[in-house]
Image (tube, coloured by chain):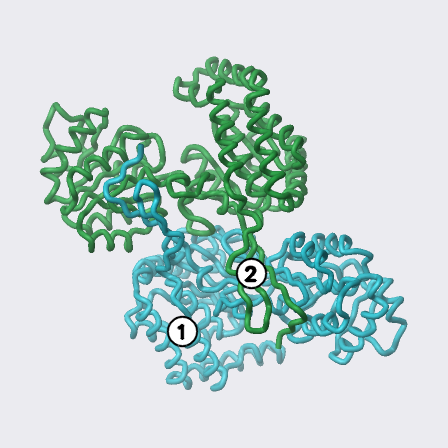
Chain colours: A green, B cyan
Amino acid sequence: MTTATTDLDAKGKAARAAARKLARLSSSVKDQALFNIADALKTQEEKILAANAKDIQAGKDRGLSEALLDRLMLNASRLESMAEDVRSVAALPDPIGETFEQRIMPNGLQVGRRRVPLGVIGAIYESRPNVTVDISVLCLKSGNAVILRGGSEAIHSNTVLARVVRDSIAGAGVPQDAVQFIDSPDRALVERMLSMKEYIDLMIPRGGADLIRYVGENARMPVITGGIGVCHTYVDKDANVENAVAIAYNAKVQRPTVCNALDTLLVHSEIAPRYLPAIAQEWTKAGVEMHCDSRALSILGPSEAFNLKPATEDDWGMEFLSLTAAVKVVDSLDEALEHIERYGSGHSEAIITENYSKAMRFLDDVDAAAVFVNASTRFTDGSQFGLGAEVAISTNKMHARGPMGLRELTSYKWTVLGNGQVRS
Amino acid sequence: MTTATTDLDAKGKAARAAARKLARLSSSVKDQALFNIADALKTQEEKILAANAKDIQAGKDRGLSEALLDRLMLNASRLESMAEDVRSVAALPDPIGETFEQRIMPNGLQVGRRRVPLGVIGAIYESRPNVTVDISVLCLKSGNAVILRGGSEAIHSNTVLARVVRDSIAGAGVPQDAVQFIDSPDRALVERMLSMKEYIDLMIPRGGADLIRYVGENARMPVITGGIGVCHTYVDKDANVENAVAIAYNAKVQRPTVCNALDTLLVHSEIAPRYLPAIAQEWTKAGVEMHCDSRALSILGPSEAFNLKPATEDDWGMEFLSLTAAVKVVDSLDEALEHIERYGSGHSEAIITENYSKAMRFLDDVDAAAVFVNASTRFTDGSQFGLGAEVAISTNKMHARGPMGLRELTSYKWTVLGNGQVRS
């Protein structure tokens, strides 16, 4: 083993030991740790921004795009908003210790399930330095230790933020070792981290599709794979056109770079002549490029008014993450369902219809983390679904599916209280 | 690919397609399928027993032990009891379709989670042919397709039982392909099966520790690892001695070959002089051999009355699966907790005490699937915990922990009903 991997093993061991202590801490101690972090983001502002300036300068020297530099950049107001987020997490109920399905069995045994932390979470993430604080705080609140591996572009910012977090929690009586930060850019460490099954119970990758796929394919421990959304909105022939325009507009335009944004619009052939020009007009104002199948093209084009291209096979099942949408005309709900089954990624799918039976059938038949009737797929989100915080959006079926809150970072143990019972 | 692996891939594909249909079937269709299976175990008795006779003959020729031959053996009364088990599963509530945490958000969106099947379960199991029916029935009831790989000793019995299951469910309108049976003894198929991530959502190994470890280490999909229990019972100085004798006796003797049986008895030094002779007397009558640390030995021996041996380091953390127990005297609850943390397998752990604070501390601090106060660890079981059926006992923390019932074979999807909502 190299020095770096030996060091990583030591971090794993330390995180495991800290997790055992963390699991037993009261909510008030954990919340105090979070308040300390929020305060320190203000008191340590100068140090944090100085480190961030180094990353920004290095990024400029390496020719990072304006968009990436913006993701990387911290300032006083961004730090304040990070601190606010930390205080919001502190205000959420503690998931640990909640007991559920407690019952008394016929033999008098009191059997229940009590929520406990998972143990140690591994996080691998890209560029945005706020993730260092965000993930640490979600893990601490849910009683989990965490091992953080950020992107090399943000190495100076992340190193200082991790130190701020560790110092802050120590001040509240939470073991520093509950938050481990990998400060070496050595790529081999990612490989080693993915094999550390004995120290890491769950891996959360945050970043682009390539990172998530790499972690999913190579990790020896469970991984939350998610964040990849090929999302369809199907406008049924019985749709309310006004709703259907507003929803598809919102789903594509409100924040096109995220996983729950619309990728493919499916439109029933009977409503397409009325609907397609209406959505095309709104989308065009927002700068949306439409990759249309031949039937959609023949309704909309050739027109200088819209930004149209013929769709290719690659457009179906494409996650655009930009102001581009694939558009296809279908002849039935069945055809829409088949298309979604074939090309969807099991993230978020919507039907727009006033027809009750079709709405119910869509809900029943579509196999995705979130299935919508008459609403924008953009709602797939922890806080929009009432979870308070969002750890990740899972497209796995095991453990947790869709938006994951604090509770989804927990396990449970069965507690059994008896007075001498034996099994016969 | 060999013909056999191509055939296995075809089974995977067929199971996946059947799973999609199965997910939409009503409870009554699934239950009818189960009743048909129960009936067929009677009507097809002759065929089943003839196939079983071949396995028994082959087992005798290969020199299988009496115990293994007994596990392998079917007869009319065993088939009747299998049929009864199938009818009990049919009588359980259907977990699929249950909606939970449904709420109306401030913007009027109705957000809830609806239980759906996981998809396709893979099962790899040893010798007992009843597992073929048992696992099929649990998967069908929970809306999952299943790919079965039984042990080569039971190949004739399993082949006929799988055919009986497939024919029975087809008669109820459930796709035959929902149950796939691998009828080739080719070992390479297990390897291929463990790599079939695209067709198998969850792998359940049932059998010895070696099988479970092999599947856990090699499967590319999630695995329920469990069934390995190194279980401690700690007799505190404030224990009720009578309870403590009855519980340790039950935990060791009632069924020594299972994972929730007692392996190590930890006894507080202040109660050991009274307690150890009492339990030793009862255990000795039942034929229990005690592997004692030096302090336990000095209390109990040298004595011809008991079956004593000095414990070696290997005895701690050993799953005996027989009438053997390791015995150790400790000086405090802390020492007991440390021993359990070091040597336990996270399955089932018990404290016997009348002291409230120590009972609570044991519940809080022990990290295991099931933690008991004043009761036998033998209760760790799906039906004893009120789950109706038991699919497996998981020592994982992800997804499900401890006894798993039908609900633990499900996932959920978020359903969102709107009337035109868009995200701002």
Left or right for B116, reference B228: left
> Element type at marker 1?
helix
Q: Quadrant of residue B352?
A: bottom right
**Badge 1 sits on which subunit?**
B
Q: Which residue is mark 1?
A: B91
A17 or A338: nearer the eye?
Answer: A17
Vertical arrangement, residue B198 with respect to residue B284, above or below: above
- The percent coordinates of residue B350 (x first, y second) are 68, 63
Left or right for A19, reference A314: right
Which class describes the residues within 10 Å of circle 1: few (<14), some (14-19), or many (20+)?
Answer: some
Point out the image quarter for the N terminus of chain A.
Answer: top right
A190 or A334: nearer the eye?
Answer: A334
Left or right for B203, reference B303: left
Q: Which residue is mark 2?
A: A112
**Badge 2 sits on which subunit?**
A
Point out the image quarter for the C terminus of chain A.
Answer: bottom right
Q: What residue is shown at x 55% (from left), y 32% (from top)?
A: A149
- Residue B340: assigned label: none
Vertical arrangement, residue A42 with respect to residue B12, above or below: above
- Closest to the camera, between mark 1 and mark 2, is 2
> Element type at marker 2?
strand
A383 or A229: nearer the eye?
Answer: A383
Q: What residue is shown at x 72% (from left), y 72% (from top)?
A: B243
- The percent coordinates of residue A295 (x first, y second) are 12, 39
Q: What residue is shown at x 42% (from left), y 73% (from top)?
A: B159
- The percent coordinates of residue A364 (x first, y second) are 28, 55
- The percent coordinates of residue B336 (x first, y second) are 75, 56
Instruction: Name the residue type under label 2.
Output: Gly
Cα gap from disc 1 to disc 2, whole angstroms: 23 Å
Vertical arrangement, residue B156 with respect to residue B401, above or below: below
Residue A1 seen in render: no
Q: What residue is shown at x 32% (from left), y 37% (from top)?
A: A378
